[in-house]
Structure formats: C-alpha cells, structure tokens
Amino acid sequence: MQEKKSIHGSWASRWIFILAATGSAVGLGNIWKFPYITGENGGGAFVLVYLICIALVGIPIMIAEVFIGRRARQSPINALMDLAEESGSSKRWGAIGFMGMLSGVLIFSFYSVVAGWVLQYIYSTATGALNGVSSEQAGNLFNELLADPTTLLMWHTIFTIMVVVVVIGGVNAGLERATRIMMPALFILLFVLFGYGMSTDGFAAGWSFMFDFDFGKLTWDAVLVAVGHSFFTLSLGMGSIMAYGSYMPKRASIGSTVLAIGFLDTLVALVAGLAIFPIIFSNGMDPAAGPGLMFISLPVAFGQMAGGQFFGTLFFILIGVAAWTSAISLLEPTVAYLVERVGMKRSSATIALGVVVWAMGILCLGSFNFMSDVSLFGKNVFDFLDYITANIMLPLGGILVAVFAGWVVKQKFSTDEINLKSEALFKLWLFVVKFIAPVAVGVVFVLNL
C-alpha cells in the first residue's frame, strides 16, 4: 500500500511530536487538578493507583489513537471512516471522531474561562496585588473576579486569540513553532518552582504526603477518580492525539513514543505536586483544599513567603503556558476537518471556529454572574459542560476507540503501524485494548453517571 500523506504537513521529528503531544496532555489537569485530587484522596496510595491506571488504561488507548491517526493521515472523523472502510466495516465509526471533536470544542469553551482566571492571576501576582493577603481576602478576591463579567470576558477573549493565532499558522509555522518555544519554557519554569519547593520547610512533609502509602485512606471513590484522571490527563477521547498522530513521521516508533509522552505527562504531574505541597505545608494550609488550592490557598502562601511575588508570578505563568499548549490541541482536530471536508482555508476555518468557541465561552463565564440563575439539569452552563464532557463524552469516546482498534480494525493494519519489536508485547497491547481498557473505563463511566 502506498503511504498516505497529510495535506496539513507533518512534524519535523519524533521529538517534536513527543513535545507537541505532551503539550496537549499537560494542562490544567496536571498542574491544577492532579495536586488537589491527590490531596483529597489520601496522597501516596492514590498516586500509586494513578500510575497503574496510566499504564493499563492511558498508554494502550493512546497507542490506539496515534496509530489510527498515522495510518489514515486525516482528521479524526475521516481517519476513522477510512480505516473502517479499509477493514470492511461501516463508515459510521466516524461518529467517534465527531463526538471527540465536539468534546474538544465544548471543553475549550469553559477551559478558556479558567485560563482567563490564570491570566488575571499572572497580572495580580506580578503587580503585587496579592502580597500579604489573608485566606479570607484571597477568597474574596477570587469571588469578586467570578462576579465581574467584564474582566472575565477580557481575559477569555485574550486567551482565545492567543490560541487562534497559533492554530492559524498550521502544523509547522504554528503548532510546531509554538511547541519548540513553549514546552522547554514549561519544563524550565516547573523545575525552577520545584527547586523553590525543595528550599522550603515543608518539602519533607510534601514528599511524605505524595509518596507515603496509607491504603487506609484509599476509598473506592478514590480508585475511580484515579482511573478517570489517568485517562483524561493524556487528552484521550477528544481527537487531539489522533490528529497529532496523523502528522507523526512514519519512521518513528509509536510504542516508545507514546511511552515517552506518558512518562513526561506523569513527571509534570508529580513534580507539580512536589512544587505545590511543600509551599502548602510550609504555611500550615490544608492540602485537601480542593479546586480552591490554586486560586485561594497558593496566592496566600506566595503572598506571605520571601520571594513569593516572583515565584508566584512564575507559577501562574507556568499554568498559563500549560493551558495554552492544551487548548491549541482542542481546536486542531476540528480545524483540520473543516479544511479537509469543507475545503475552507485554514485561516478561515480557525477564525470561524474561534468565534464559535468564544461565544460559547461567554455563556460559561456568565454562569458565575449574569447567567447564574440559568440551569441545565440542575447545573449552571459551566458545570454542565464540564460534567457531560468529563463524565460522558470522553470516557464513551475512549471505550469506542479501544473497541474500534481492538475489534474492528484489521489486525494486519495495527501490527504494521505499531510495529512493536516483540510479538508478545503486541499481543499484550491487543489484549489490554480489547478487554481491560474498555472494562476499566466502562466501570468509571457507569459509576460516574
């Protein structure tokens, strides 16, 4: 069979793909969500379960997404339709790609609002507005921000423009160029903050909290959270990794590449925890403070520490970069589809999609102020979109990708594309994708409903 080529271009090297896919995976989930769910679920025992889930669920499904994308060299909908047809099955399997792309668009609409909070906190920290704040004052400042639609709209608009500008540039001039700059910056910032955490009095307590195993604190709910987060942290089920895989060089090994992505993504989550928890413990704060950990607890901690203004600003810049690299990957699959199927120019497709997600974002930011009385199934717009994507669309997409890769695609195609040196390793991957991953994600899916 003649090798297919993507009309959008390809990554310059395997390492660029690794950095781009890691950028997609590393986002608010790693640096904001992972530390606080670790705090809420007992620390080290939860981390161990999370790492097992990454290995048994996340990595196998990511391999499936990458090989589907690279085999077809198209956006998720077209990739799934073509590979299904090649395998003698129905083109209706393309619906998985549609659901993934829709998930990405819906996630972007509220993700950009949270990213807007981060941009506000970069400004507030850098200007010294948070210096010496008490916990009550920090809480009031955050609530005032949520109640101010004008400020939220400004930052939401700026962030959307930041993402649109990168995506318009295409694979090489946009995504790849941004990746070459932003990912090294992200790792440098992260390890500077890790060094800062090591210098605090709370580092030993933070280390113990993350890596001491107390299985008495591990509940069934915590196991479900670990399975769910291991899946979502790798950007699975939303078409991003499939789209990025379609730009992957043919000579690159999918297995070792995905392992590298999984390793880097997990490393960022763990190092973020080791940067954040020492600061929390040094200031006598609650590590299980929940979502408020980043926007209330940490500003108080930074505001009261020597050098806190500088390191606090670095911290929020780090969060902003992580959000930016992830958000780019949320729009790319749909832009690629509009170029392929509708024949739009990339610039036109990106701007049109940017306007749509920007408008949807206004509904999400309104959830905290002028639309706070609007309810969808008992939730405001922001929480509703967060719930249906995280608890329904992404896990369902993940299950269907695993079923498609394991049961529908001809085994010859997956063997050729994944090209593992060991037949035993390939059989292990196939077994996990056919049986373990769908069941594990399915349990989380059902119990989260």
Image: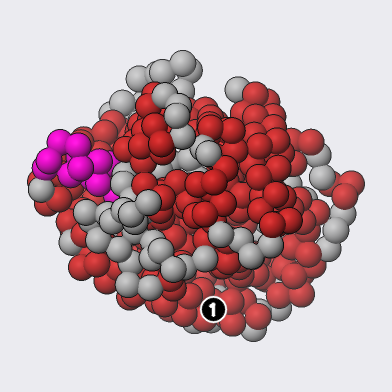
Point out the stretch of residues depicted in magenta: 332-344
Residue indicated by mark 1: 191
Q: Residue at x 76, y 75 (%)?
A: 204
| Residue 343 within the magenta-colored segment of the rendering | yes
Residue drawn 49% across and 55% down?
417
Q: Amino acid at mark 1?
A: Phe
**Image quarter of residue 399:** top right
Query: Does 314 appear above or below 2?
Result: below
Image location (x, y in percent) of residue 6: 27, 54
In this view of the protein, which residue sits in the foreground, 324 or 120?
324
Residue 207 seen in render: yes
The image position of residue 144, as x and y in percent, is 36, 45
Inspect the magenta stretch and tell me whether residue 336 lies in it.
Answer: yes
Dot 1 alpha-carbon crowd within 10 angstroms: few under 14, some 14 to 19, many 20 or more: some
Mostly what secondary structure, the magenta segment? helix
Residue farthest to the top, as pictured: 377
The one of 440 and 91 positioned closer to us in this rendering? 91
Residue 158 vs residue 328: left or right?
left
Where residue 115 appears, as percent x and y from the top left, is 36, 52
Residue at 62% of width from left, 57% of height from top? 35
Of residues 363 and 146, the one drawn nearer to the viewer in this rendering: 363
**173 relative to 303 in the view: left or right:** left
Q: How many marks?
A: 1
Quadrant housing the C terminus = top right
Which of 168 and 283 lies nearest the eye of the viewer? 168
**SS of the residue under disc 1:** helix
Residue drawn at (44%, 73%) of the image: 15
